[in-house]
Amino acid sequence: MWSVECEGMIPKRILKIALRECGNLRKNLVYLFCMVFFPILVTVFFTTMMSDGLPTKMPVGVVDNDNTSTSRAIVRKLDSFQASHVVEHYPNINEARKAIQRNKIYAFLYIPKGTTDGLLSAQQPKISFYYSQASLVAGALLYRDLKTVSMLGSAAVGQSTMRAKGYTDGQIKTFLQPIVIDLHMIGNPWASYNYYLSTMIIPGILMLFMFLITAYSLGAEIKFGTAKEWMAMANNNILVALTGKLLPQFLIFLTIFYSFMYYLFGILNFPHPGGIVMILVLGLLTVLASIGFGIFAFGLMPSLRMSLSVCSLWAVLGFSMSGATFPIFAMHHSIEALAQLFPLRHYYMIYQICIFNGYTFVDAWFNIMALLIFMALPFFVVNKIRKAMLEYEYIP
């Protein structure tokens, strides 16, 4: 009779604690901003900033000392490319170099005097281009454009010369381009940085908020002296106390995360051949794993300041350890092993395998198991959290 009564009381205690937590969420603006306002702002900011997919019309300069119809044609071709926009002509290399150093342009093309005469007489004149790698994306895209326009300039002169000698168009094409490249970009044929970055950066920031809010809500009980009251409502059962306290946060974060995924895949039509079921499962696993890690971080060191520092550090390092910007297998073996300790790494792998490429969950079983382990981490520290709530005093 007693056990049945206690079991019946547990849902009531959880509901009562959850209602208490809803009151805390309503009173403290930190929760409103970190759980609703900032996630929405971050989502809109990044997806809007990269809405074109690729940077376009980046400023470049030209140093045209040849100043012939051929050199001007090369400049016009460069200006016609999607990523490049010729904004200035400079009298010499020094002026163009200073413009790069002042961030007025990202690159410049140098056409020395006598280039056209050298092309017509088959003397292989040199066309130089300089680009800044301080911005990796801009440097890579402009390098592609500058290299292409240099090759097109020499090919145009060669085509005119060979046509004057009586070669057919087929012979000219074979001579100028003996090997034809058939390029297929798998998964992201648009080369969109929005598809590539927003699906990693935004979830990483959302996970950061989940880490911080979870640790903050636990630490705030000690800081504001309400820990014993909270534990008394759960009859000193730490599992009941944690479940009731984090239930409203879980529902809010899950709603925000699903809204983010609907915005990406439903409104912006990001590619998702894996389907809606995999999206929903990944969102649920991510939210539960993030909250689990936040509880674990607080349990390791039941201090508001220290647990927030650990959560911040782990979330920020997760961006580098996810493998989205630099492949994990190219890192040192110890770093590759360490990367498995970051939830964002496993989120990104499941997204790439199951949603972006359409494979089954079986192919991502290791990463799914890793997120399940993150969900189970709080069970290793619940006793320490219980002791902290009942015995610790807050030290500013």
Image (cartoon, rainbow, N blue to C red):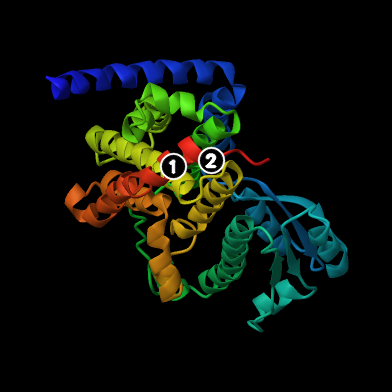
Query: Which residue, as the protein is rendered here, is positioned at the far left?
Result: 1
Residue 355 visible? The answer is yes
Residue 192 visible? The answer is no
Residue under numbered circle 2:
392
Real-space CA distance between mark 1 and mark 2, rounded to the nearest whole angstrom: 7 Å
Residue at left offset 65%, top offset 81%: 124
The reply, left or right, for residue 283 in relation to residue 149 is left
Q: Nearer the viewer, residue 212 or 167?
A: 212
The reply, left or right, for residue 6 in relation to residue 325 is left
| Quarter-of-image position of residue 160 | bottom right
> Considering the image in quadrants, where does the N terminus appear?
top left
Residue 320 is situated, as x and y percent measured from the top left of the image, at 51, 58
The label shown at residue 387 is: 1
For residue 278, above or below residue 103: above
1 and 2 marks in contact (CB < 8 Å): yes
The reply, left or right, for residue 45 in relation to residue 273 is right
Residue 99 is situated, as x and y percent measured from the top left of the image, at 83, 58
Residue at left offset 69%, top offset 61%: 134
Q: Amino acid at mark 2?
A: Tyr
The reply, left or right, for residue 264 in relation to residue 48 is left
Q: Amino acid at mark 1?
A: Lys
The label shown at residue 28 is: none
For residue 44, above or below residue 119: above
Q: Of callouts 1 and 2, which one flags the residue occurring earlier in the amino acid sequence?
A: 1
Residue 147 is situated, as x and y percent measured from the top left of the image, at 59, 66
Circle 2 packing at 10 Å, graded few (<14), some (14-19), many (20+), is: some
Q: Nearer the viewer, residue 174 or 214?
A: 214
